[in-house]
Amino acid sequence: MKVKRHAIIREIIENTAIETQEELAAALRARQIDVTQATVSRDIKTMMLVKVPAGNGRYRYALPKEKGAVLSKERMARLFYDSVVSLDYSENIIVVKTLPGAANAVAAVLDHTPWQEIVGTVAGDDSILVVVKPREAAPEVVRRMEKFFAQ
């Protein structure tokens, strides 16, 4: 079912400007694919969908042009600059606040960084929890993120 759903998602985003997870879930339901927001969120992350400009200051989901583009420093810098609103941390958890709808794209990039200290991320619509190990590494990871955020 997942493979079929991913193929349908690919078709939807190639033919329709989908701006939010809710719009994507509705488009899937219109095709008789019953999904939850959590499933759509995981699919976006798994498929490494990115947000691209759609005009008038709006963004829509798209497939990355190439796998390396998702992981590049340039992409991360652009995504952080365009999407991240603030960073903070406590102990081993970093909270990344983003513009609405951008958290999954930022989390996907963070999940694919070579930063060994990042255990994983959990993304909502506009917030990401980044789990870091060891906890002493959190300030350094935040500093690295701030380099991209401040450009």
Image (cartoon, grey):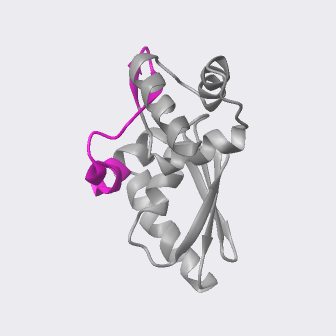
Task: Give the side of residue 127 with respect to residue 13, left or right.
Answer: right
Point out the residue furthest to the top here: 56
- Residue 65 belongs to magenta span: yes
Residue range (magenta): 52-76
How many numbered dots are placed on residues in this image? 0
Q: Residue at x 65, y 17 (%)?
A: 30
Q: Position of residue 21 (x, y in %)?
A: 62, 32
Q: Nearer the viewer, residue 128 or 112?
A: 112
Q: Residue at x 43, y 14 (%)?
A: 56
Q: Residue at x 59, y 42 (%)?
A: 1
| Rendered position, 103 above or below 12 | below
Q: Nearer the viewer, residue 30 or 87?
A: 30
Q: Nearer the viewer, residue 37 or 113?
A: 37
**Residue 91 found in image quarter:** bottom right
Q: Is residue 125 visible to the viewer in this orientation of the structure?
A: no
Q: Position of residue 70 (x, y in %)?
A: 35, 50
Q: Is residue 81 visible to the viewer in this orientation of the structure?
A: yes
Task: Give the side of residue 86 with respect to residue 62, left or right.
Answer: right
Q: Residue at x 55, y 36 (%)?
A: 5
Task: Give the side of residue 82 with respect to residue 38, left or right.
Answer: left
Task: Give the side of residue 86 with respect to residue 12, left or right.
Answer: right
